[in-house]
Amino acid sequence: MTLNPAVSDVACTQAFDTSASMSPSRGPMRSAARETIDSHALLRGGRELVIVHGEHEYRLRLTQNDKLILTK
């Protein structure tokens, strides 16, 4: 299954973190908008998805126990 990033039929919402939080290893983190995608909408009814990041491919799988596993 291939997901076209130009297609906007994946359920997306944006959550805004308005409070600055602290990271123990990096100090203060800046507030940033996060995009949230429902896993079932991302998988589009399938059980596996290939994600291309740069020159690498990652496989996102939905297990029989309803867990997500991301492997390279």
Image (cartoon, rainbow, N blue to C red):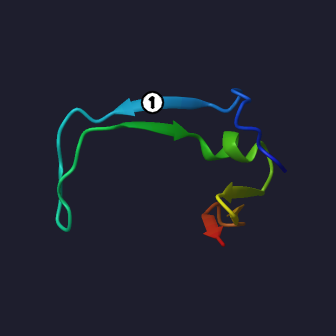
**Above-or-below relation of 55 to 12:** below
Under circle 1, the secondary element is strand
Residue type indicated by callout 1: Gln
The picture places residue 69, in percent across and down from the top left corner, at 62, 67
The picture places residue 13, in percent across and down from the top left corner, at 50, 29
Q: Quick one: quadrant of the C terminus?
A: bottom right
Quarter-wise, where is residue 56 in the image? Answer: bottom right
Pointer 1: what residue?
Answer: 14
Position of 54 with respect to 44 (left or right) is left
Q: Which residue lies most toward the right here? A: 1
The picture places residue 33, in percent across and down from the top left corner, at 37, 34
Instruction: Write the residue at 64% across / 60% down.
Output: 66
Instruction: Write the residue at 70% across / 56% down.
Output: 51
Quarter-wise, where is residue 68 in the image? Answer: bottom right
Instruction: Write the residue at 74% across / 29% down.
Output: 7
Position of 35 with respect to 51 (left or right) is left
The picture places residue 44, in percent across and down from the top left corner, at 77, 42
Instruction: Write the residue at 39% across / 32% down.
Output: 15
Crowd around label 1: few <14 · some 14–19 · many ≥20 (10 Å): few
- Between 13 and 54, the one nearer to me in the picture: 54
**Above-or-below relation of 67 to 14:** below
- Between 51 and 64, the one nearer to me in the picture: 51
**Above-or-below relation of 25 to 42:** below
